[in-house]
Each structure stands twice: as structure tokens, then as C-alpha cells.
């Protein structure tokens, strides 16, 4: 199987039953990652279609582009070089321990690591990643840059929501180049602006 290009579907599990004014059942339930060569596109879309958050990572130039659609409003943030993707938790002070344990997820052999936060008191969690999907430095533009493979199970946060992301399916397929281009009808904003807009939605 060719794993150099394709799509991974992830399930999202929320640690809270309610986030802001929303039940977790109306929040996004899936995350889709499309990849090709040195580009990754991650999409999270609200179950009722009220918002769509997309991050496009250019792994070669170490840049992220984030765009947010909320109802009829559209915003885009063009990230700086070596800046983590905006809107998600920064995981400051994270240390990673590689355990040597293994687990099969979505048909792939995965290695286990444990993320701990000795300086902040955040809860530790397990990470599973695989080297069987052919993406070079897949986490180079994320807080998980220490993880040397494609992450198949991990934690992240979005506004006040903390989430467990678990890979469910992989499809080897051609991904059109246009998938990594930002639509032209998005208004460019600063990092602070787009994060404030998203956090307001999640409150």
C-alpha cells in the first residue's frame, strides 16, 4: 500500500459534556487530515455546519495557514515561519517519554509516548504515532515536533474544549493540489483576531 499520499479520518472525543453554550454532540465529531508530499491539511467542521476550521501546514517552509469559516464570515491567518498552528493549545513545557509499547490503530503499528507537563500541572496523556505513513517530519509545525511519526491518537485543545483525537480510517488516494490553497474570499486577520473569534464561539 502506498502511504505517501492520502486521507486519515479521526474521531474526536470530548472530555466535557458541554463546552460553552454547546452540547458536545453538536460540536465537531471528526477531524480529516489530507496529505501530499510536504503538505498537510487538517479540517475540523461543526456537526451542524456552523463553523469550519482548517490548518494547512507547509512542512518544507515550516509555515501554517489557518482559516476559519463561521456562518457567512470567513477569516484567514498566514502564520510566520516556525510558528505553531494557531487556535489549538500550545502545550508549553511538555516533555515526552518514549515507552517502547506498541498498539495497532486503524491498521498501523503505532509506538507509544507519554506527554507530561512538570511545570504547569497539566494532566499527562498517552500519544500513539506511526512511521508506516510516509510523511517527512509530519509534526514540524506543531507543538508535537518531538514526535517522529504521524500521530494516530493524542490530545489537543480548542478554546475551552479538550479533546482526544483517535484515527479511525486511512485511505491511500490522490489529493488535488487545490486542496492546499486558501479560497480567495477569506479576509486576512492577525493571529490574535482569529484566536479571539474562535474562543468567543467556544465560550
Image: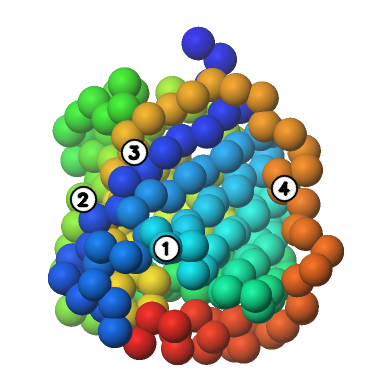
Pair 3/2: label in front: 3
Residue 53 percent location from the top left of the image: 54, 64
Query: Is 66 or 100 nearer to us in this picture?
Result: 66
Give how far apart the Cα atoms at labels 3 and 2 are: 14 Å
Among the two numbered marks 4 and 3 on one chain, the one whose residue lies closer to the N terminus: 3
Residue beneath label 2, please? 126
Query: Is 1 or 53 nearer to us in this picture?
Result: 53
Mark 2 nearby-residue class (10 Å; few <14, some 14–19, many ≥20) = some
Residue beneath label 3, please? 167
Q: Secondary structure at mark 4?
A: helix
Residue at (60%, 81%) from the top-left corner?
194
Number of marks drawn: 4
Give how far apart the Cα atoms at labels 4 and 3 are: 21 Å
Pair 4/2: label in front: 4
Residue beneath label 1, please? 48
Query: Is 39 or 195 nearer to us in this picture?
Result: 195
Mark 1 nearby-residue class (10 Å; few <14, some 14–19, many ≥20) = few
Among the two numbered marks 1 and 3 on one chain, the one whose residue lies closer to the N terminus: 1
Name which quarter of the figure residue 183 lies in.
bottom right
Amino acid at each position: 500500500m502506498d502511504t505517501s499520499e492520502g486521507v486519515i479520518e479521526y474521531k474526536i472525543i470530548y472530555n466535557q459534556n458541554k463546552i460553552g453554550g454547546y452540547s458536545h454532540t453538536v460540536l465537531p465529531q471528526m477531524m480529516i487530515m489530507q496529505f501530499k508530499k510536504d503538505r498537510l491539511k487538517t479540517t475540523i467542521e461543526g456537526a451542524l455546519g456552523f463553523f469550519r476550521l482548517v490548518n494547512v501546514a507547509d512542512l518544507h517552509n515550516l509555515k501554517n495557514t489557518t482559516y476559519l469559516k463561521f456562518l457567512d464570515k470567513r477569516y484567514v491567518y498566514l502564520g510566520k515561519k516556525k510558528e505553531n498552528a494557531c487556535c489549538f493549545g500550545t502545550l508549553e513545557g511538555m516533555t515526552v517519554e518514549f515507552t517502547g509499547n506498541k498498539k495497532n490503530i486503524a491498521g498501523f503499528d503505532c509506538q507509544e509516548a507519554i506527554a507530561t507537563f512538570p511545570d504547569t500541572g497539566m494532566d499527562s496523556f498517552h500519544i500513539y504515532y506511526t512511521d508506516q505513513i510516509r510523511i517527512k517530519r509530519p509534526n514540524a509545525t506543531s507543538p508535537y515536533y518531538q514526535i517522529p511519526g504521524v500521530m494516530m491518537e493524542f490530545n489537543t485543545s480548542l478554546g475551552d474544549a479538550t479533546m482526544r483525537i483517535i484515527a479511525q480510517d486511512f485511505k491511500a488516494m490522490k489529493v488535488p493540489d487545490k486542496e492546499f490553497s486558501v479560497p480567495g474570499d477569506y479576509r486576512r486577520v492577525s493571529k490574535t483576531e482569529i484566536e479571539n473569534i474562535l474562543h468567543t464561539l467556544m465560550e
